[in-house]
Image: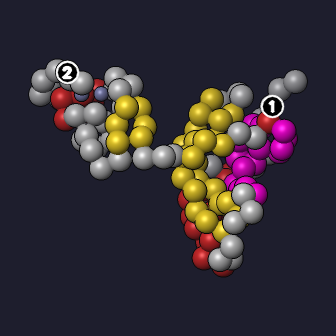
């Protein structure tokens, strides 16, 4: 079975779509995190949850598994993410441009300013 997105045009619209749902319906909260797709792996994503815990995701069909409710998996961002350069845990607001440190950022984007020692 090959899984492909039903609505690939929704890619890149998840944040705006989720925000407008939240603005229109105050029983919804905006959630940022990852959608874990069995075909694509983890993808950064935005969706909504109702106060009852129900997930309301206006753009889920951008993912290959989006139209199969049993395969949907969400992991909310809880203030810590892996550094894109070295995978060390980085807390929101710390580090540099989403990386653990400026040195790690620099070596990943090709600016040799030192070596990450995190
Ligand atoms: Zn790093
Ligand atoms: Zn570092």
Residue 81: x %, y % from top left: 43, 37
**Which residue: 30% across, 50% down?**
93
Q: In the shown orientation, is residue 72 left or right of residue 68?
A: left
In the picture, the quarter occupied by the N terminus is: top right
> Which label lies toward us, 1 or 2?
2
Circle 1 packing at 10 Å, graded few (<14), some (14-19), many (20+), is few
Q: Are discs 1 and 2 less than 8 Å apart at CB?
A: no
Front-most of 54 and 102? 54
Element carrying mark 1? loop
Residue 36: x %, y % from top left: 65, 35
Residue 58 seen: no
* Pointer 1 residue: 3
Q: In which quadrant of the rendered view does residue 29 lie?
A: bottom right
* Pointer 2 residue: 117
**Which residue: 30% across, 36% down?**
99
Q: Specify start and end residues of the magenta stretch as a single range.
A: 54-70
Q: CA distance from mark 1 to mark 2?
A: 41 Å
Q: Quadrant of ligand 1?
A: top left
Q: How many marks?
A: 2
**Which residue: 39% across, 25% down?**
87
Q: In which quadrant of the rendered view does residue 63 lie?
A: top right
Q: In the shown orientation, is residue 62 left or right of residue 106?
A: right
Residue 71 seen: yes
Q: Is residue 38 above or below residue 77?
A: above
Residue 8: x %, y % from top left: 70, 46
Q: In the shown orientation, is residue 101 left or right of residue 25?
A: left
Residue 62: in magenta span? yes
Element carrying mark 2? loop
In the picture, the quarter occupied by the C terminus is: top left
Q: Is residue 51 above or below residue 81?
A: below
* Mark 2 Cβ and ligand 2 under 8 Å apart: yes
């Amino acid at each position: 079975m090959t899984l492909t997105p039903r609505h690939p045009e929704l890619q890149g619209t998840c944040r705006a779509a989720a925000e407008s749902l939240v603005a229109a319906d105050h029983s919804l909260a905006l959630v940022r995190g990852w959608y874990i797709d069995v075909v694509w792996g983890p993808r950064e994503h935005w969706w909504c949850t109702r106060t009852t815990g129900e997930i309301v995701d206006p753009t889920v069909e951008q993912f290959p598994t989006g139209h199969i409710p049993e395969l949907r998996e969400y992991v909310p961002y809880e203030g810590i993410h892996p550094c894109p350069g070295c995978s060390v845990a980085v807390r929101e607001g710390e580090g540099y441009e989403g990386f653990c440190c400026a040195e790690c950022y620099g070596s990943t984007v090709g600016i040799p300013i030192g070596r990450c020692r995190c």
